[in-house]
Structures are given as structure tokens and as C-alpha cells.
Image (spheres, rainbow, N blue to C red):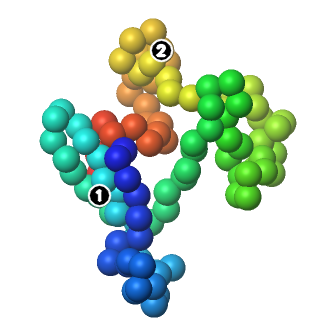
């Protein structure tokens, strides 16, 4: 992913902003692309201290109890963890994800 913003919005146009989809820009296989999304999860953290899944920087309700079932970071879906993710769908911000 190279960027994300509300579609058809700008610094001076924000009327109806909450109804506009997000435009997600990405680069894959040397090509730039874009997709529209109803929601975007910002998962910017650090490897040692990933951001929680909840809003306002707080853990989501129940997140602490299920921490052993939540995969933080980027899984190696093409390498060491391929068997775990083969044939499954996962939520990621990786540019390889396409609509």
C-alpha cells in the first residue's frame, strides 16, 4: 500500500466525506493500482509493540483475552507459514491483496 484517502475529497472539499469510499493506492508487480474500500484498518505499529486493533489506540473489547489467536505483523504467507494460510483468506494491508 502506498497511500489511502477518502475518494473525491480534498483540503477544501469535505461535504459528505463520511459517505465517500476510501481510495487505496498500491504497487504490485511494478505497476501502480487503486481500489475502493468501505473501511480501512490502520495497523501501523512497530514489530515489538504493534498497535492494538481497537479505536483510539486502545485494545478492542476482548482483544486481550484473544491475543494468542491474533496475528500481529506480516506473516510469511509465501514461505515458512504457507501451510497455515494456504486456501484461506486473511486481512492484510499488503499490496498483493486485490479486490
The image shows residue 19 at horizontal and vertical percentages of 46, 81
Name the N-terminal-most of marks 1 and 2: 1
Q: Would you name the residue on which mark 1 appears?
A: 35
Q: Given contact means CB atoms under 8 Å apart, are the residues at marks 1 and 2 in contact? A: no
Q: Which mark is residue 81?
A: 2
Q: Could you tell me if residue 83 is visible in this image?
A: no
Q: Please tell me whether mark 2 sits on a helix, a strand or a loop.
A: loop
Q: Could you tell me if residue 81 is visible in this image?
A: yes
Q: Quadrant of residue 68?
A: top right
| Camera-side residue of 91 and 14 | 14
Q: Quadrant of residue 8?
A: bottom left
| Camera-side residue of 93 and 14 | 14
Up the image or down, 95 lies above or below 9; here it is: above
Q: Is residue 70 left or right of residue 93?
A: right
Picture residue at 31% right of the left edge, 53% below the top: 25
Picture residue at 39% right of the left edge, 37% below the top: 94
Counting other residues with Cα less than 10 Å from the Cα at mark 2, is it few (<14), some (14-19), or many (20 or more)?
A: few
Amino acid at each position: 500500500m502506498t497511500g489511502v484517502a477518502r475518494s473525491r475529497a480534498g483540503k477544501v472539499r469535505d461535504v459528505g466525506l463520511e459517505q465517500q469510499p476510501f481510495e487505496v493506492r498500491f504497487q504490485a508487480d511494478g505497476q501502480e493500482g487503486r481500489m475502493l474500500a468501505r473501511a480501512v484498518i490502520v495497523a501501523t505499529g512497530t514489530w515489538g509493540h504493534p498497535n492494538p486493533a481497537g479505536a483510539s489506540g486502545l485494545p478492542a473489547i476482548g482483544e486481550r483475552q484473544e491475543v494468542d489467536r491474533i496475528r500481529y505483523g506480516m506473516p510469511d504467507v509465501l514461505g515458512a507459514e504457507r501451510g497455515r494460510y494456504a486456501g484461506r483468506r486473511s486481512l492484510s494491508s499488503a499490496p498483493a491483496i486485490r479486490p
